[in-house]
Amino acid sequence: MALDKPYLDVPGTTIFDADQSRKGYWLNQFCMSLMKAENRARFKADEDAYLAEWPMTDEQKAAVRARDLNWAMRTGGNIYFLAKLGATDGLSFQQMAGSMTGMTEQQYRDMMIAGGRSPEGNRVVGEQGDAQGPVSQSAAWKAWQEAEAQQALADAVESADAAAKGKASGHARITASVFSSHVPAIGAAVDHGKTGEPYWAPMFKGYDFSKQWMKENTPDVIFLVYNDHATNFDLGVIPTFAIGTAAEFEPADEGYGPRPVPVVKGHPRLASHIAQSVIQQDFDLTIVNDLKVDHGLTVPMNLMFGSPAEWPCQVIPFHVNVVQYPVPSGARCFALGQAIRRAIESYDEPLKVQIWGTGGMSHQLQGPRAGLINAEWDNRFLDRLIADPKDLSTMPHIDYVREAGSEGIELVMWLIARGAMADVADVAGGKAPKLVHRFFHVPASNTAVGHVILENQS
Ligand code: DHB
Ligand code: FE
């Protein structure tokens, strides 16, 4: 099922959506760099040299050189970013907008003075209005298109070849959910070769099964729900839910130096698809392209994969604010999981996707009550997570805080992963997932470690 893009047939209009943003990322970031006077001066002094510093496509660079804004938008540019280029040339917004219409500056100004362009005939492609094209086009863009037409012919032959070879088709599926605590000290034990010490060995033993299971069930992509711990996000910006849509995410320096773990490779296409689908289901996600990942993400990766030179699959980081109240409710997280499932299952590529919920279990890192552990409550949480997550999702925050400690609130994130499983009634109505592993251990640093693996059966 394709995403809902009802705006594609509005004439003479490009809506800047997640796909456009992905395409235009470096073009728009280049434009943004022109916000600095010193960069504007360098660009003006030598355009080619300045453009060479940016990993834009050749076409994007050509569109910038031609100052062809319609062309630049075709390659992913957004008008508010492109306006920095116009501003560098001393143009007003009216001059920039007018330059895309095929009118002279004076004609466009006169049209605006006369009341602006009418929507009549300009609502849907194929009507008879005055915005139905052709678009104004620089000679450079025309030449580019001619060359491109030649290439398209060659590509068509190649894709017919691929189709003949029976390229796999189908949609993405959520195969399993994994739940695990994340504790910085676990990362330190891995990094300093202490996993065999008496303090740590019993904790790591609980993940021996998981590592083997992961080898046999490596997905293509992990949708990894975690919380950033005042690492990437400071108090300048506090997103409630944030999805990482970049190609790579480096391990963050949390004050001890970056962990010596591999760079996380993202899945920009699937992540953008999920962002668009989930936002269209009324969950307001923050989209993040510039993100360093902290122990909340890297420690569960070590627990499940050990310490390989490269992570064996792609990862979409998904951050949930559990640092500053109000944090999202369990019910909201559970419903979000269902929306994420719909999004993933509507992606037209047969990817195997796991969804992970990390953080928890009981722990309190602050105040005279620090060190709180409630093993009985934690185990009851695991029972309910497995067997009756809908009921569990109605539990208010205050219960987490009182019973599992102030930082035990991280457990709400597990409900996102659980909500994405096949048995959650109003999504798929599939069979209950198979419990393949359950583990509980106290302590890891200040925390009770809980870990569950559930496999979808349908
Ligand atoms: C600890 C646990 C956490 O979840 C965390 O984010 C930081 C520290 C701990 O137990 O030390
Ligand atoms: Fe944490």
Image: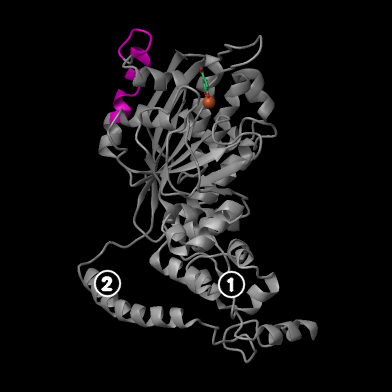
Q: Which residues are magenta?
A: 196-211
> Splitting the image into 4 quarters, where does residue 35 fall?
bottom right
Q: Position of residue 291 (x, y in %)?
A: 50, 41
Of the pair 250 and 179, the residue shown nearer to us? 250
Q: Which mark is residue 7?
A: 1
Label 2: which secondary element: helix
Under mark 1, the amino acid is Tyr
Residue at point 40% right, 25% down?
438
10 Å crowding of disc 1: few (<14), some (14-19), many (20+): few
Residue at point 25% right, 64% down?
167
Label 1: which secondary element: helix
Residue at point 66% right, 29% down?
397
Q: Which mark is residue 443?
A: none
Confirm whether the magenta stretch covers residue 209: yes
Residue contact at pointers 2 and 1, CB within 8 angstroms = no
Can residue 346 be seen at all in this image of the molecule?
Answer: no
Left/right of residue 162 with respect to residue 41 in the rendered view: left
Q: Which mark is residue 159?
A: 2
- Of all residues, the one furthest to the right in this rendering is 114
Q: Position of residue 197 (x, y in %)?
A: 32, 9
10 Å crowding of disc 2: few (<14), some (14-19), many (20+): few
Q: Position of residue 452 (x, y in %)?
A: 42, 29
Q: Position of residue 170 (x, y in %)?
A: 34, 61
Of the pair 200 and 290, the residue shown nearer to us? 290
Residue 371 to residue 408: above or below: above
Under mark 2, the amino acid is Ser
Residue 375 to residue 455: above or below: above
